[in-house]
Amino acid sequence: MTDLSDLLSQTRDLALRYMESLPQRRIAQQPDHHKLVAALGGPLGDEGLDPGVVVQQLADGADPGLVATTAGRFFGFVEGGVLPAALAADWLTAAWDQNPGFYTISPAAAVVEEVVAGWILDLLALPPHASVGFTTGAQMAILAGLAAGRHHVLEQAGWDVDADGLTGAPPVRVIVGEERHATIGRALRFLGLGERAVTVVPADHQGRMDAAALRAELARSDVPTIVAAQAGNVNTGSFDPFREIGEATRAHGAWLHVDGAFGLWAAASPRYRHLVDGIELADSWATDAHKTLNVPYDSGIVVCARPATHQAALSLRAPYLTLAGHETRNGSDWTPESSRRARAFAVWAAFRSLGRSGVARLVEGLCDNAQRFASGLARSADLEVLNDVVFTQVLFRVGDDDDRTRETARLIQQSGDAWLGETLWRDTVALRISVSDHATSGEDVDRTIAAINDASAAAA
Ligand SMILES: *Cc1c(COP(=O)(O)O)cnc(C)c1O
């Protein structure tokens, strides 16, 4: 039997070997699916195996199916990298196995959540009295923010939705931008408000919500209303005009939620803060630490300007839970989960290792590389950059041709040199670059531009 010390050393070696292999690794290895299943599958034997054998089997079996998203040349979806301090804290988190749901079972986790909450509000210039919850990702943070909004707007109408449900409740209007993220719709499904039962406000050519159209829509009716705006569109990286949107929703008494999964971090940089001007006028915000902040999966954050509403919508209620101290933080009051991983430890470590200026430099470094892509791609006659590159996202098209654009993505993915994905932007096929990894260097960008040029020529 491998002893614990040997097991952890072996695991450390396996992790290090993987990380050291990243510069040479193909980004996606395109493994044979059946071989992957054969290596990791088969019947679960009757007898257990030695932990050292188990870890080795996992590492060997998984390796061909790992996508090198942290190698610096993965630009698909919006995938953050891993800061060393956050990785180390995440290992400790598993070793400590703390449940941050209740103060009594982990004062350390509760205090770290409280401390990190304060740092987040400060860095993102959000109201200092706001409440903060730590979720798996922006999806659950959006659910939490919209749940608080649903509670608030119905309470204003004299209805306690959390006690009495939606049956017989006054109707709730949900206004969203045309270019909202898909996770907004899923949250509305969970909340019984319905994915299709939304009022959609048009967006402009960059995907920004039309504030005048929102104002007109708000004026049309005074039923309880929730508005969902966006900081950072997944395709263009654009930001909604928050000041106008915030003033309009406040004047109407509506609830404003902001989905800022990766874009909210613009607030941490003096250079990019203007993009989120007026964001403090919102009532709730959702963001991720596993994207722009480069904390390992998973790590989302919800912030709410009305702590009592946040708590009323989400807290767990059971007589035995009153054992947990009232003056102190119970993490389960602020998220949809009860027991969960103590995610704030890794966020704490990310913040401590970067400091305020380091967070700003992280954001600015990602944006600098996005600009480097934009100017590099613009030098090729065949490539057209489709968006105003204001943040970390670059959208482009090849030869004004859907098939050639698609084929270019396929060839790049196949090359193993880099990875970027296809998207649909306003009914045309486009390729999307999301610069979200601190490990990406200028050299990585140049090498990827070369791969794009090779692939687009081959796809002609
Ligand atoms: C990634 C993303 C989400 C969903 O976040 P998860 O971390 O996957 O839950 C929501 N909105 C936007 C704009 C995103 O980029």
Image (cartoon, rainbow, N blue to C red):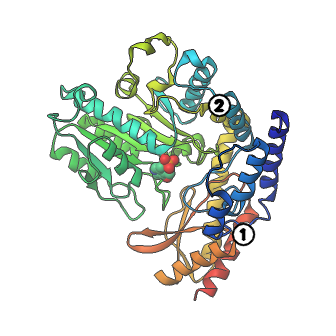
The verdict on label 1 being within 8 Å of ligand 1 is no
The answer to whether one can see residue 16 in this image is yes
Disc 1 on helix, strand or loop?
helix
x then y, percent, for residue 186? 36, 49
- Farthest-out residue, front: 46
Residue 402 in the image: above or below residue 173: below
Q: Seen in the image, is 369 located left or right of residue 226? A: right
Q: Seen in the image, is 403 located left or right of residue 53? A: left
Q: Residues within 10 Å of mark 1 (few under 14, many from 20)?
A: some
Q: Nearer the viewer, residue 237 or 315?
A: 315
Alpha carbon of mark 2 to alpha carbon of mark 1: how far?
Answer: 35 Å
Residue 378 in the image: above or below residue 60: below
Q: Nearer the viewer, residue 124 or 17?
A: 17
Q: Quadrant of residue 152?
A: top left
Mark 2 lies on residue = 345
Picture residue at 70% right of the left edge, 76% below the top:
450
The mark closer to the camera, 2 or 1, is 2
Picture residue at 21% right of the left edge, 49% below the top:
217
- Residue 277 badge: none
Amino acid on which the number 2 mark rests in the picture: Phe
Picture residue at 80% right of the left edge, 65% below the top:
24
Position of the N terminus by quadrant: top right
Residue 107 in the image: above or below residue 10: above
